[in-house]
Image: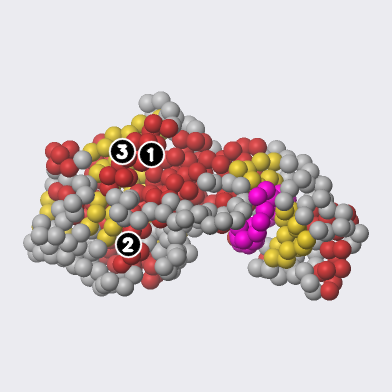
Amino acid sequence: MSLTFSLTDARPSAADTDAVVVGVFEDKLMTSAAAELDEASAGALKRLLDSGDVSGKLGQVSRLFQLAGVKAPRVLVVGLGEQPKFDAHRFGRVCADAGKALKGGPAKRATSYLAELDVPGRDLAWKTLTAALVADRENYRYTATVKAKNGTTLGELAFRAPGADAAIARAGAIAAGVELARELGNLPPNICNPGYIAEQGRKLAASESNLSCEVLGRAELEALNMGSLLAVARGSANEPQLVVLKYTGAGDDKPYVLVGKGITFDTGGISLKPGAGMEEMKFDMMGAGSVIGTTLAVARLGLPLNLVTLAVAVENMPDGDAYRPSDVVTTMSGQTVEVLNTDAEGRLILCDALTYAQRFEPKATVDVATLTGACVVALGKHAHGLFSKQDDFAMELHAAGETSLDRAWRLPLWDDYQQQLESGFADMANIGGKYAGAITAACFLARFTENQRWAHLDIAGTAWDEGRKGMATGRPVYLLTQWLMDRTA
């Protein structure tokens, strides 16, 4: 469950809460909230700073208990680092530090005064929204298939942010979308298969009055001549599903379209992946998970726009009927593809979905996919790979990433790379060789979006945290929701 957010006008010393959160800079400069606590405690906070028992260094969180003159039983003092270097991204970091500290403690309710910090170029609404979403992210717990551990869980977080009611409401809506995306990603693939994603789409539409859902199964996909998508699905006992969610917030206006790759488990098919780390391939559906989560956020926000979301749910398995390297498949667009590697399957399901998307005459289309390991090599775990032929469109998404602290970095989509996809046996090959793999994958998709306002987000490095205990991050729900909010501003 996501956190419950609220506003308060209580002074830090008088807040009726389990924990109070304030910040201090590295040079012992106290924020206004910290200074209020210091005054109420007869200078106790200043003495602790002078003695070195409390630090303002970035990344440091000091826990104080039963501070004299303070109603709350515990105070968290978060180090803000050097004041001249404090900016939006450092604000996000200190909010994360506070969120982690609250998750590890016994507080059920907390009151944060971090939204009062001065962040260059950011207003109170942005600070409140960001602080709330970061805290919610850090306090996420996965319990669907794990016995719940005993102990307290933070459930309520209040902010002193007068007039930021709209930001609090937005935070609740976006947090719900992020949580849905993370839950879908974290579920094991024996539960979260294509049929499960289809069922979640139906449930979502039933729960939100402004949403509808249509699910296309194998027969419907065959009738649409989606030979590329169906080829990927051939090796699995689980039927492919194309989940079509429609949000109506602007009458007959043309919609924005989101397309998400939903490979619920990716073995690589006949081009089998190495065994080590294959368990992480349950996250290969996070493109679909993130666009479904974004759709929930948009529906809860009630944005005045129309949105169509296509979640392409398929499992890539090796089987006697699985597609093979050297097969030639015919896409819905009529173009043929020589399959050189069955582990480059994401683009094969997306290309048919992108062709299908054109029937909605979209204002703009964004596809989201854990598409290439090459993108992880290029950008690591911090930034999504961003591709678009329209400079203004790329700038919109880049700006939304900067605003939401869910950043993307643009990579080239030049025609120079298209020659790497040439094939002697089909209109194109599904891979472009060992170099520029993220770019050639995007170039492949570009062939199915000619004359469209289209962008591609490669989230292979950002969709989940590494390791056996790594969880889905919920990214880029933040970026996509911000981009759509920006379209209505």
Crowd band around label 1 with a 10 angstrom C-alpha radius: few (<14), some (14–19), many (20+):
many
- Front residue of 407/349: it is 349
**Given contact means CB atoms under 8 Å apart, are the residues at marks 1 and 2 in contact?**
no
Residue at 35%, 39% (x, y): give it: 201
| 434 relative to 293 in the view: left or right | left
| 422 relative to 1 in the view: left or right | left
Q: CA distance from mark 1 to mark 3?
A: 13 Å
Q: Is residue 147 magenta?
A: no
**Given contact means CB atoms under 8 Å apart, are the residues at marks 1 and 3 in contact?**
no
Residue 484 against residue 378 in the figure, above or below: above
Residue under numbered circle 1:
256
Q: Secondary structure at mark 2?
A: helix
Residue 225 against residue 325 in the figure, above or below: above
Residue under numbered circle 2:
281
Q: Where are the magenta residues, as a range?
A: 91-119
Residue under numbered circle 3:
244
Residue 296 against residue 252 in the figure, above or below: below
**Of the residues shown, which amino acid type is indicated by label 1?**
Tyr
Dot in front, 2 or 3: 2
In terms of sequence position, does the residue under pointer 1 or pointer 3 come before the other? Answer: 3
- Front residue of 440/212: it is 212
**Of the residues shown, which amino acid type is indicated by label 2?**
Met
Crowd band around label 2 with a 10 angstrom C-alpha radius: few (<14), some (14–19), many (20+):
some
Residue at 87%, 63% (x, y): give it: 44
Dot in front, 1 or 3: 3
Residue 29 against residue 247 in the figure, above or below: below
Residue at 83%, 59% (x, y): give it: 67
